[in-house]
Amino acid sequence: QVQLVESGGGLVQAGGSLRLSCAASGRTTSAYAMGWFRQAPGKEREFLARITWSGGSTNYAGFLKGRFTISRDRAKTTFYLQMNSLKPEDTANYYCAASRYSSNYDNTRSYDYWGQGTQVTVSS
């Protein structure tokens, strides 16, 4: 089992920045990669970014256009999502997740463990 706890969400004005954190514990050695997703009311959960556990490879959703950056600390126990130039349409519940797989990283079904989510609200 891998336990994930997100933090760092909140209310921010359009154009502002937030950094989300995901603290990982438990059998983290079983994870190949960590991902960030978000889900807005009435919409499906969508992929944002992924980083391999080693930190050597990252992938992003194309629509982000460089606004978000995924990273990890050197101890590999905390993962981050730096979000810049936030827009009202970024308002959603943000989730981190752990995957044992190297493929289909943008599919929620590739992730075995999920955090409880942290709410991000961007005001116009």
Image: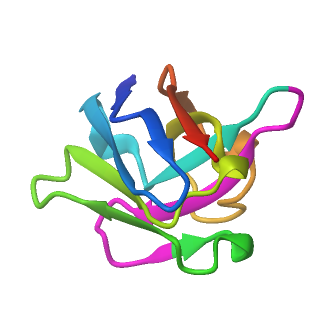
- Residue at the spot x=65%, y=40% of the render? 91
Instruction: Please tell me whether residue 90 is drawn above or below residue 119 in the rendered image.
Output: below
Number of disc labels: 0
Which span of residues is magenta-colored?
42-58
**52 falls in the magenta region:** yes
- The N terminus: image quadrant: top left
Residue 111 percent location from the top left of the image? 61, 41
Q: Going 73% across and 72% down the picture, which residue do you hit?
A: 63
What residue is rendered at 64% in x and 47% in y? 124
Q: x, y percentage for residue 72?
A: 25, 59
Q: Is residue 28 left or right of residue 118?
A: left
Give x and y (percent) for residue 28: 30, 39
Q: Quadrant of residue 102?
A: bottom right
Asked whether, in this view, residue 82 is left or right of residue 124, the answer is: left
Seen in the image, is 114 located left or right of residue 37? Answer: left
Magenta span has 97?
no
Instruction: Please identify the quarter of the rendering in which residue 105 is found.
Output: bottom right
Question: Quarter of the image holding residue 23?
Answer: top left
Q: Residue furthest front?
A: 124
Question: Residue 104's spot in the image, x, y percent?
Answer: 72, 61
Q: Is residue 92 above or below residue 32?
A: above
Colour style of the rendered protein structure = rainbow
